Amino acid sequence: MKEIYDKLIQMAISKGAASAKIIPIEAISVNDWVRQKCEFGCTQYGKKYTCPPYVQPPKQTRKILKEYNKALIIKFGEIKDRMEWRGIQKLMAELEREAFLSGLYKAFAYGAGTCKLCDNCSADQVQSPTQFDKRGCANRRIARPSMEGVGIDVYQTAKNSGYDLKVVPKEDMCFTSYCLLLLE
């Protein structure tokens, strides 16, 4: 297993991650208030298929995490342009695929923040969202939910994993971002 983990870590770092490490699933913190911040604080709420209300609620996330033992937390530092997320999202899909092909068939990636795979998301046009609307996603094969959208407290999870994540006070400042890859 260590060989596969090392391979995934090296792949992440070689493709732009600042660091990556294997963590126990218990390090992932899920809280209901995180989803509430998406609903009442994010301008992208309901506008992306990878965000609420299209993704599972925190209760379901807690249930899903019980089916795993390990995850890979990946740190991306000094992000200057929020469009860099597009590359990060594609990398997370590649890592998930590599883990799957390496025998970790339960692998599943969670991104950071709102989806940037498309310039315009058809979710923005949906009047009464349901889970079935996700069928309209142009990138269903690689689009994954945001950690925040499913209730993962990124700050606490980073802290539990040995990282120090600070709030960025202005939108135009460089920031650090984290993603998760559930493994086994």
Image: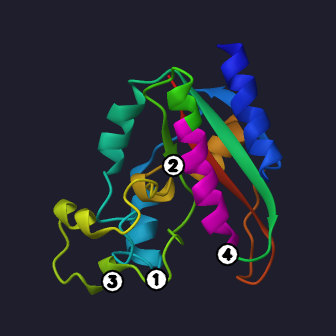
Residue 122 position in % (x across, y down): 32, 80
How far apart are labels 1 and 3 at the CA level?
11 Å
Residue at which label 1 appears? 43
Q: Residue at x 74, y 34 (%)?
A: 9
Say above or below: 175 vs 160. below
Whichever of callouts 4 and 2 sits on the residue coming sooner in the sequence is 4
Question: Is disc 3 surrounded by few (<14), some (14 to 19) or many (20+) residues within 10 Å?
Answer: some
Q: Nearer the viewer, residue 21 or 160?
A: 21
Amino acid type at image mark 3: Asp
Residue 124: numbered disc? 3
Question: Is disc 1 surrounded by few (<14), some (14 to 19) or many (20+) residues within 10 Å?
Answer: few
Mark whose residue sits in front, 1 or 3: 3
Residue 61 position in % (x across, y down): 37, 41
Residue 110: numbered disc? 2
Secondary structure, magenta segment, majority class: helix
Q: Quadrant of residue 45?
A: bottom left
Say above or below: 95 vs 173. above
Say above or below: 159 vs 147. above
Residue 129 position in % (x across, y down): 20, 72
How far apart are labels 4 and 3 at the CA level?
19 Å
Mark whose residue sits in front, 2 or 1: 2
How far apart are labels 2 and 1 at the CA level?
20 Å
Residue at which label 4 appears? 82
Residue 52 part of the magenta segment: no
How far apart are labels 4 and 2 at the CA level?
17 Å
Q: Which residues are magenta?
A: 84-97
Q: Nearer the viewer, residue 66 or 88?
A: 88
Amino acid type at image mark 1: Thr
Amino acid type at image mark 4: Arg
Q: Quadrant of residue 169?
A: bottom right
